[in-house]
Image (tube, rainbow, N blue to C red):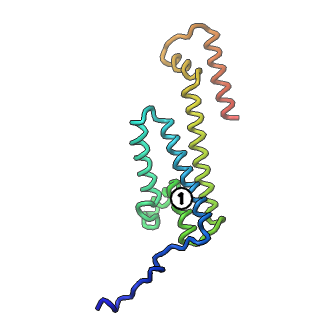
Amino acid sequence: DLHSFPTRRSSDLVLMVTGKITLLAVMAAASGLSAIALGVLLGTLAKTQEQAAPLGATITVILAAIGGVWIPVFAMPHTMQTIAKISPMNWGLQGFYDILLRDGGCSAIAPEIGLLLAFSAICFCISIYYEKFKKSVWAIDVRSIISGQETENINQTDTIKQNIINIVYNYLF
C-alpha cells in the first residue's frame, strides 16, 4: 500500500536562507573573486587563448575533484581528505555548508573567507609580477643575453644587470 510510507512535506526539502542572504553574498563574492583570480593567473601565464582554455578546464576539474564538489570529502580516503583542504573549491563549499547546513554565522565562515581572499591575492600578485616581467624592457634584454645575442655595449649590459638587481630587491623587500 503506497499510503503506508511516510511522506515528506515540501518544507522538509527547503533550505532556509532567511537572515543568511548577506552571509551567502559574502561567501559567493569571495568564491567568485578566487575564481576570477585563478582565471587571471592562467590567462597571464598562457601565451595564447588556445593554451589557457584547456589549462583552465583541467585545473577546474582537478580542484573540483579533490575539493569535494563531486564526491563528499567524508567519503574520501583519509589521504584525500587531507589533500582536499588545499583546494579553493573545498574552502568555498565548506563556507556554504557552514551557512546553509550548520547554521553558522560570520565567525563560522571567517576561515574560509580568509583562505579564499588570500588565494585571490596570491594569484593576482603572481599575475601582476609575471606580467611586469614579461612586458618590461629589461626582460627583453635579458632574453637576448640568454639567447646569445650580444648587447651593443658594456654600459647596456651593466644597466640590465642593475635593473635585474633592483627589481629582485624591490620584490623581496
* For residue 7, side relative to residue 115 (left or right): left
Give the residue at mark 1.
92
Q: What's the residue at 39%, 42% (across, down)?
A: 54
Q: What's the residue at 60%, 7% (across, down)?
A: 153
Q: Quadrant of residue 122?
A: top right
Image position, residue 62 (x, y; %): 42, 51
Q: Quadrant of the C terminus?
A: top right
Q: From this viewpoint, which residue is outermost toward the left?
A: 1
Q: Is residue 117 above or below residue 145?
A: below
Q: Is residue 39 above or below residue 100?
A: above
* Camera-side residue of 106 and 71: 106
Image position, residue 38 (x, y; %): 52, 45
* Camera-side residue of 11 and 116: 11
Image position, residue 171 (x, y; %): 66, 33
Q: Is residue 62 above or below residue 52?
A: below
* Camera-side residue of 156 and 109: 109
* Camera-side residue of 135 and 152: 135
- Assign a secondary structure to mark 1: helix
* For residue 160, side relative to residue 58 (left or right): right
Q: From this viewpoint, which residue is outermost toward the right?
A: 173
Residue type, numbered disc 1: Gly
Label 1, residues with CA under 10 Å away: few <14, some 14-19, many ≥20? many
Q: What's the residue at 58%, 59% (across, down)?
A: 27
Q: Quadrant of residue 140?
A: top right
Q: From this viewpoint, which residue is outermost toward the top?
A: 153
Image position, residue 19 (x, y; %): 62, 70
How many numbered circles does the render carry?
A: 1
